[in-house]
Image (cartoon, grey):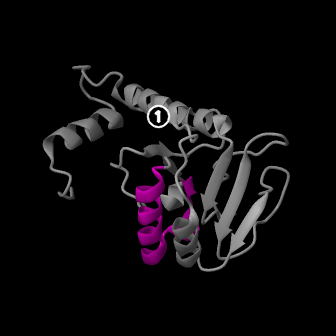
Amino acid sequence: MLTGAGSNRKMPARMLRAFVDKTKIPFISTQMGKGVLDERDPLYLGNAALSSNDFLHRAIEKSDLIINVGHDDIEKPPFFMEQNSFQVIHVNFSSAEVDPVYFPQLEVIGDIANSIWQIKERIMPQNTWDFSYSMKVKKAVESHLLEGADDPRFPCCHRDWLQMCEKLCPLTELLH
């Protein structure tokens, strides 16, 4: 599942939380969908900051279905669709802007929160769902982010600063 700009509202976020809790479907965010769901969640794979050739795109390409919630054309495309690849369900307040790289097979148009709630009420997690590849990608992302974490050189890069802050500050603290 992918959370985009349109899902970044209070009620869609609540319904998406309930949906993920029930289905255990891993999720990705776009830049404007960040924060919709807690990024500390074990099912969070990462942020699709690029359109292709990133760790997360390996998980997307191996998927058979992407539930794209709140996709908005004002954002850079989080992935490029190709014929005969994964299928996409577009869940949003408005219809998809169909083009050569985004052509969802199904659209659920209306209030996002209500749409996700109704899907959640009807969906039943299946034993045949296999998210193991997505979780391998998550581990690869985490390993990549830790590369160089023990490098003692100064000055350190921004990634090192973030890792130091995460170690030193409780998750509930804000840095100014």
| Residue 137: percent from left, percent from top | 50, 31
| Residue 29 placement, left or right of 168 | right
Q: Please tell me whether residue 173 belongs to the stretch shown in magenta.
A: no
Residue at 64% of width from left, 62% of height from top?
Answer: 71
- The residue type indicated by label 1 comes to Met
| Residue 55: percent from left, percent from top | 55, 32
**Magenta-highlighted residues:** 1-24
| Residue 54 placement, left or right of 144 | right
Q: Nearer the viewer, residue 76 or 143?
A: 143
Neighbour tally class for label 1: few under 14, some 14-19, many 20 plus, Cα within 10 Å: some
Q: Nearer the viewer, residue 96 or 161?
A: 96
110 relative to 29, above or below:
below
Q: Nearer the viewer, residue 144 or 63?
A: 63
Q: Nearer the viewer, residue 35 or 41?
A: 41
Q: Which image quadrant: the C terminus? A: bottom left
- Would you say the magenta stretch is mainly helix, strand or loop? helix
32 relative to 131, above or below:
below
| Residue 170 placement, left or right of 6 | left
Find disc 1 in the rendering and name its residue: 135
